[in-house]
Amino acid sequence: MSVTTILNRKGTDVLTVRPEATVREAVTSLAHKRVGALVVNSDGLGVEGIVSERDVVWGLAAHGQRLLDRPVTEIMSTDVTTCRANAAIDEVMAEMTNRRIRHIPVVEDGHLAGIVSIGDVVKHRIDELELQAASLQEYVLGRAD
């Protein structure tokens, strides 16, 4: 299965923030939209960085409340792991685990095409396991008749 499977279910909308936006604006967006990360870009098309709840917490611990009025570029991660829509979900899950990240933007031809979270990957895996269990149960019960 590929990332396309997840995007087909959840959609391809990605919440973004401009690089010059303040950390306060990013925090407000994270809270109101109930998401864990925003892709940072100037044009709405590419990926210049990503700012997560974790980045905010680490920034506040290091700089205090004054950080809230600084631009997100001061806390965003610029070494962003991305994937393509045809990437295998297992590979994406392994990358998230190995790099200890929770969000991977999906990029096609240099353009932002979606985002996959660890929650999306876990939900997909649980659905897959439930289907396997149901199939096995049907097989076993069907054979017992």
Image (cartoon, rainbow, N blue to C red):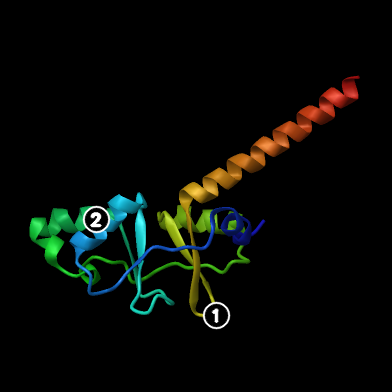
The front one of 115 and 80 is 115
Secondary structure, mark 1, is loop
> Which quadrant: the C terminus?
top right
Q: Residue furthest front?
A: 32
| Residue at the image point whose x is 47% and y is 50% from the top | 118
| Residue at the image point whose x is 19% and y is 67% from the top | 22
The front one of 103 and 30 is 30
User: Could you give the CA–CA distance between mark 1 and mark 2, rounded to whole angstroms?
Assistant: 31 Å
What type is the residue that disc 2 sits on? Thr
| Residue at the image point whose x is 77% and y is 35% from the top | 135
- Residue beneath label 1, please? 109
Q: Seen in the image, is 106 located left or right of residue 79?
A: right
Contact, mark 1 vs mark 2 (Cβ under 8 Å): no
Which is more foreground, mark 1 or mark 2? Answer: 2
The front one of 118 and 14 is 14
**Dot 1 or dot 2, earlier in sequence:** 2
Label disc, if present, on residue 28 of the rendered structure? 2
Density class for disc 2 (Cα within 10 Å; few <14, some 14-19, many ≥20) is: few
Q: Residue furthest top?
A: 145
**Quadrant of residue 127 in the image?**
top right
**Relative height, residue 68 to residue 139 (above, below):** below
Where's residue 120, x and y in %? Answer: 51, 50
What type is the residue that disc 1 sits on? Asp
Secondary structure, mark 2, is helix
Where's residue 116, x and y in %? Answer: 49, 58
**Relative height, residue 10 to residue 127 (above, below):** below
Where's residue 68, x and y in %? Answer: 14, 60
**Relative height, residue 45 to residue 140 (above, below):** below
Density class for disc 1 (Cα within 10 Å; few <14, some 14-19, many ≥20) is: few
**Quadrant of residue 144 in the image?**
top right
Q: Seen in the image, is 130 located left or right of residue 98?
A: right
Q: Seen in the image, is 123 located left or right of residue 26?
A: right
